[in-house]
Image (cartoon, rainbow, N blue to C red):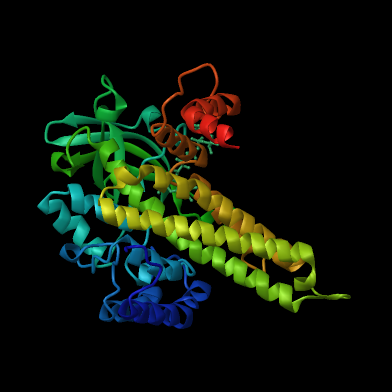
Amino acid sequence: MAWDFETDPEYQQLLDWADRFVRDEVEPLDLVLGNPYDKSDGRAMAIARPLQQQVRDHGLWACHLGPELGGPGFGQVKLALLNEILGRSRWAPTIFGCQAPDSGNAEILAHYGTEEQKAKYLQPLLNGEISSCYSMTEPHAGADPTLFTTSAVRDGDEWVINGHKWFSSNARYSEFLIVMAVTNPDISAYQGMSMFIVPADTPGVNIIRNVGVGTEPEEEGSHAYIHYDNVRVPADHVLGGEGQAFVIAQTRLGGGRIHHAMRTIAQVRQAFDMMCERALARQTRTGPLASLQMTQERIADSWIEIEQFRLLVLRTAWLIDKHKDYKAVRKDISAIKALMPKVMYDIVQRSMHLHGSLGMSNEMPFSSWMVTAEMLALADGPTETHKVVVARQVLKEYQPHDGLFPRGHLPTRAEAARAKYAELLEHAAAEL
Ligand SMILES: Cc1cc2nc3c(=O)[nH]c(=O)nc-3n(C[C@H](O)[C@H](O)[C@H](O)COP(=O)(O)OP(=O)(O)OC[C@H]3O[C@@H](n4cnc5c(N)ncnc54)[C@H](O)[C@@H]3O)c2cc1C
């Protein structure tokens, strides 16, 4: 019997350590340090490095990776249980060496990179020494990559990249960017686009501006609008071969989406915990908010939604471990991707509302979490496109029903049932 909802006692001990460590040592960093991707921030690095060493000492560094890349190779279920803790803190993924988008970039470099590319770009990324950027979305087209126009043209031993990219996260802190570009406009985009590794200091990589989210001050944004202006990279800086961009993008995004979902469980639990504490503490003239039925409904709905979401995430993680192939679990990954922003939005909104004016003030984290919910609805593809994937995959499991009436038509079914048991029914009637 393989169904089991329990954690190995040894791993539970590690999770308990991670829980305490994140609460006591890492969560406070969110309130005093800047951007975790800024490796040039000496003060932040001086605090972060010893904490990262403690994570290594506990065997929890880069848990998304297998032993060949310096991780423990726990698989997705164990990673999910850890990410349920790390998602509480902005700094925690960096302290544990599994922060997006570096984790996804490391995954594709490991999978498709040459030995030289791995030595130069992957190893320092895995060591947490540098940050990286994934530069795919364009200002005129995001959800549909077949509309991208950034091009790369071969010129002798080099590729020359031209075009604009939008919302390239952390480009300002990155040592290199992975850029998707059209290399053959005459064939289908699915074969005519390639990925390039572009060192950030290459002439022509021009960040027009760093766009922020929500109410972030202009200068603090970390999503770059980039003009690649005659950017020349050596021919060997193609990743995974010419025409492989779509295949690589799918490898990368499959893992990225479920890892976001795992961390989202932690975020919604935070909002939920705050909702329950507030409901018990805040008094009305008839008693605490918790005694009011509409508050109780909010709490019950939220608890049920979190548990449903968590089970779907864990089951999807289990399926990935079982099939070892993101494509085989596409429907499930898209399902949690589509559900994630709704769960986050609904629970944060309820918790914010129960906190009244304090809840929507800038003294509480709810408004930034509302922006996070929208970020989850867009980054790695909008909800609509994921729902389409779910529906298409589900419909593959069905056939149209022949006949004038549908399969569930009761008179037709009753007629068939009467025909099946006609003899027995007649016999039983005769004996009465
Ligand atoms: C916080 C954050 C970080 C990001 N980081 C990166 C990054 O590092 N690198 C990178 O390359 N990109 C990044 N992105 C961009 C992200 O991939 C895009 O936002 C996403 O692909 C959607 O593209 P778009 O924003 O241009 O929206 P559009 O493509 O303009 O879509 C807008 C809306 O139109 C609707 N829509 C679009 N297409 C369809 C469709 N086929 N069916 C139904 N409805 C549709 C949906 O409602 C959708 O939300 C990031 C985005 C966010 C929010």
**Residue 421 rendering spot, x and y as whole percentages:** 49, 31
**Residue 401 rendering spot, x and y as whole percentages:** 46, 23
Name of the residue lying farthest toward the front:
431
**Residue 37 rendering spot, x and y as whole percentages:** 38, 63
**Image quadrant where one finds the N terminus:** bottom left
Quadrant for residue 405, please give it.
top right
Q: Is residue 349 visible?
A: yes
| Residue at screen point 44% across, 65% down | 35
Q: Is residue 132 visible?
A: no
Q: Is residue 428 left or right of residue 317?
A: right
Q: Nearer the viewer, residue 137 or 44?
A: 137
**Residue 105 rendering spot, x and y as whole percentages:** 29, 52
| Residue at screen point 24% across, 50% down | 108
| Residue at screen point 12% across, 31% down | 156
**Image quadrant where one finds the C terminus:** top right
Quadrant for residue 83, please give it.
bottom left
Give above or below for 245 relative to 172: above
